[in-house]
């Protein structure tokens, strides 16, 4: 049974967060980048557990492509990119408008997506913890196609309400990851856009597909929804290209469930296809992927005699209990 939350503590944290946001939004983008680099360097040195996870993930994903010094440099870059991204998120409402977004955004491969949007009908938009993943939902709202974005509800209700209002400024609606399935179905039935982060561990009972040569537990609900509602799956990304707050926003692939074979393997095939597309994006610029999170937290269970002779969890010790 979960302990009841302390409302005074939650509200105090919320007020502190609001104050911090006001201070950071008063800075210029360039000033906020200076602060981001300082915070990134600080986090790199004090956040040892996630730093080790990042090093191990890079080693498992790329093998001998990077030596230890190069992997360390990439992990430092991940901290810096993530801190810069947080600063940019605070500036997005003031910097990205219908009249000004071209100053900071370069679109790539967007024509086929716009054609599908204008045709009408449900669409599933996927991205991963790559580049500035918060930007996609905001931009679609700026373009006049506000999505329903699936995200985990924060434990602090005051912070959750504040973040939801921030994300919904251009019309996108937030759908709770837990308990929001009916809302997801209704969005697709009404011909709306439903967006997901598609690289999150789905637990021991998830669907295991290949990601950088390793089994990765993946949510199969995305494929099930796409097939049931005949919704094309759009793979999108927002990759920092600089200098400063400038991004390339693109769509490398659209997966149409109508092109599948219509067999029991369709869910696995669609899930593998969008996972592979995300991998291709990350390989282009691995420094903009959040290697610090446990994408391979769970692994398929061993069966038979071999399972008794091997450890229950083949992941490195440092990754087994990191949140």
Image (cartoon, rainbow, N blue to C red):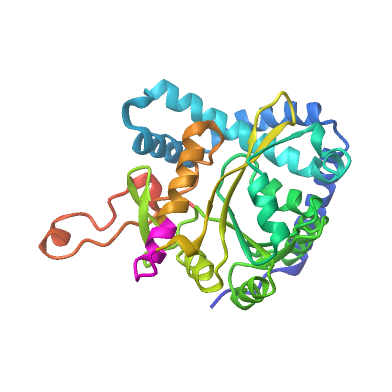
Q: Residue furthest left?
A: 305
**Is residue 227 shown above or below 19?**
below
Residue 156 appearing in the image: yes
Quadrant of residue 161 in the image?
A: bottom right
Pick the residue in front: 76 or 11: 76
- Is 113 displayed left or right of 318 in the figure? right
* Residue drawn where x is 71% and y is 68% of the image: 6
Q: Is residue 269 magenta?
A: yes
* Residue drawn where x is 74% and y is 29% of the image: 33
* Residue drawn where x is 64% and y is 66% of the image: 122
Q: Position of residue 68 (x, y in %)?
A: 38, 24
Quadrant of residue 28 in the image?
A: top right
**Is residue 134 shown above or below 233?**
above
- Is 75 displayed left or right of 243 in the figure? left
Q: Position of residue 101 (x, y in %)?
A: 81, 39
**Is residue 256 shown above or below 228?**
above
Q: Position of residue 243 (x, y in %)?
A: 72, 23
Pick the residue in front: 6 or 254: 254
* Residue drawn where x is 35% and y is 70% of the image: 263
Residue 206 appearing in the image: no
Q: Is residue 166 magenta?
A: no
Which span of residues is magenta-colored?
261-271
Quadrant of residue 312 in the image?
A: bottom left
Q: Position of residue 318 (x, y in %)?
A: 38, 45
């Amino acid at each position: 049974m979960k302990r009841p939350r302390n409302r005074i503590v939650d509200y105090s944290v919320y007020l502190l967060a609001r104050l911090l946001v006001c201070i950071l939004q008063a800075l210029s983008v360039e000033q906020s980048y200076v602060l981001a680099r300082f915070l990134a360097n600080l986090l790199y040195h004090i956040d040892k557990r996630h730093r080790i996870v990042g090093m191990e993930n890079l080693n498992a994903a790329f093998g001998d492509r990077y030596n230890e010094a190069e992997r360390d440099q990439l992990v430092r870059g991940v901290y810096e990119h993530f801190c810069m991204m947080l600063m940019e998120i605070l500036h997005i409402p003031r910097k990205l408008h219908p009249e000004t977004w071209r100053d900071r955004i370069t679109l790539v491969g967007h024509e086929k997506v716009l054609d599908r949007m204008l045709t009408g009908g449900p669409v599933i938009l996927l991205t991963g913890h790559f580049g500035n993943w918060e930007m996609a939902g905001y931009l679609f709202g700026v373009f006049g196609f506000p999505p329903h974005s699936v995200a985990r509800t924060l434990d602090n209700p005051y912070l959750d309400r504040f973040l939801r209002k921030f994300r919904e400024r251009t019309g996108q609606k937030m759908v709770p990851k837990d308990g929001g399935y009916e809302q997801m179905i209704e969005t697709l039935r009404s011909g709306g856009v439903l967006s997901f982060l598609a690289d999150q561990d789905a637990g021991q009972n998830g669907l295991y597909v290949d990601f950088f040569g390793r089994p990765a537990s993946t949510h199969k609900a995305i494929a099930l929804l796409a097939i049931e509602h005949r919704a094309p799956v759009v793979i999108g990304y927002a990759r920092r290209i600089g200098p400063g707050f400038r991004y390339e926003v693109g769509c490398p692939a659209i997966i149409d469930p109508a092109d599948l074979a219509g067999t029991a393997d369709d869910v696995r095939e669609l899930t593998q296809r969008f996972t592979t597309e995300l991998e291709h994006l990350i390989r282009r610029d691995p420094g903009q992927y959040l290697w610090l999170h446990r994408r391979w937290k769970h692994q398929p269970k061993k069966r038979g005699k071999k399972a008794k002779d091997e450890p229950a969890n083949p992941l490195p010790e440092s990754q087994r209990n990191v949140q």
